[in-house]
Image (cartoon, helix red, strand yellow):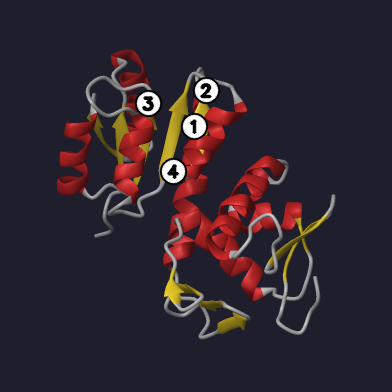
Amino acid sequence: MAKQTCILVVDDDPRLVRFVKANLEALHYKVVTAEESSTALELLARESPDLVILDIMLPGNMDGYELCEHIRSFSMVPVLMLTAKVEEQDKVKGLQIGADDYLTKPFGVPELLARLEALLRRAQLSQAAQPGLTFSSGDLTVDLLRRRVIVRGEEVYLTPTEYRLLAELASNAGRVMLHEELLGKVWGPEYRGEVEYLRAYVRHLRGKIELDPSRPLHILSRHGIGYILVKSSESA
């Protein structure tokens, strides 16, 4: 019998929790809930959820950003952050500390389900076996079989979404990939217009793999078009 998909909802608003729980359980998801970080961490260890829905504003000694960062220190579980804030820097901050997506309150059931299902689909694709292929260029090596990234002789930690983006570029090295193409393959067809997602993650990747992120040698932009992961023989 297939394991029931488990969703951990971390939010101290009981009405929102009831709303989310009722709608997800109606679709046969298993839902566990926590009001603050310590309970959330206990449930993460005990239930091994397939996805975490996490509010930024939490009571106690750890807010949503801090909890997400802590989760990322030991788990690759997809994290969907909930925020009442609409400032771009708040959204980017969540992506920088390892969240996979964000949803602005108030939200409707169709939007919640679309983002949740896209995250679960991406997680399943990330876990699927990659072809036995290794991309190497200069000081960068991407081992698609073992899902390892080596930069200047050291293994580099990437979030699941960062890795999927780099793996997609590596699988198409030397070819300009359109913004919409990358968004569709890495995030899903629902995200083809979310170019700022792509820009944020390219910035994150450059910060981890480029010697000087302001003068990238590996991931190059083609203004208004897309990105290319260059091969050693190619010039910037």
| Residue contact at pointers 2 and 4, CB within 8 angstroms | no
Marks counted in the figure total: 4
Other residues around mark 2 within 10 Å, as few (<14) / some (14–19) / many (≥20): few
Q: Element under label 3?
A: helix
Within 10 Å of disc 1 (Cα), the crowding (few <14, some 14-19, many 20+) is some
CA gap, disc 1 to disc 2? 6 Å
Which residue is the extreme one toward the front? 212
Determine the CA span between mark 4 and mark 1.
21 Å
For marks 2 and 4, give the one nearer the viewer.
4
Within 10 angstroms of label 3, few (less than 14), some, or many (20 or more) residues?
some
- Determine which residue is flagged by label 1: 112
Between label 4 and label 3, give the one nearer the viewer: 4
The reply, left or right, for residue 193 in relation to residue 142 is right
Answer above or below: position of 166 versus 134: above
Disc 2 designates what residue? 108
Label 3 vs label 1: CA separation?
9 Å
The type of residue carrying mark 3 is: Val
Q: Nearer the viewer, residue 196 or 3?
A: 196
Element assignment for label 1: helix
| Residue contact at pointers 3 and 1, CB within 8 angstroms | yes
User: Residue 153 at what x, y percent from top left?
Assistant: 46, 79
Q: Relative to 189, does residue 108 appear above or below in the rendering?
A: above
In percent of the image, x 52 and y 22: which residue is there?
A: 107
Q: Position of residue 138 (x, y in %)?
A: 63, 80
In this view, 47 is above or below 103:
below
Q: Return the residue at label 4.
A: 97
Name the quarter where the N terminus is drawn: bottom left
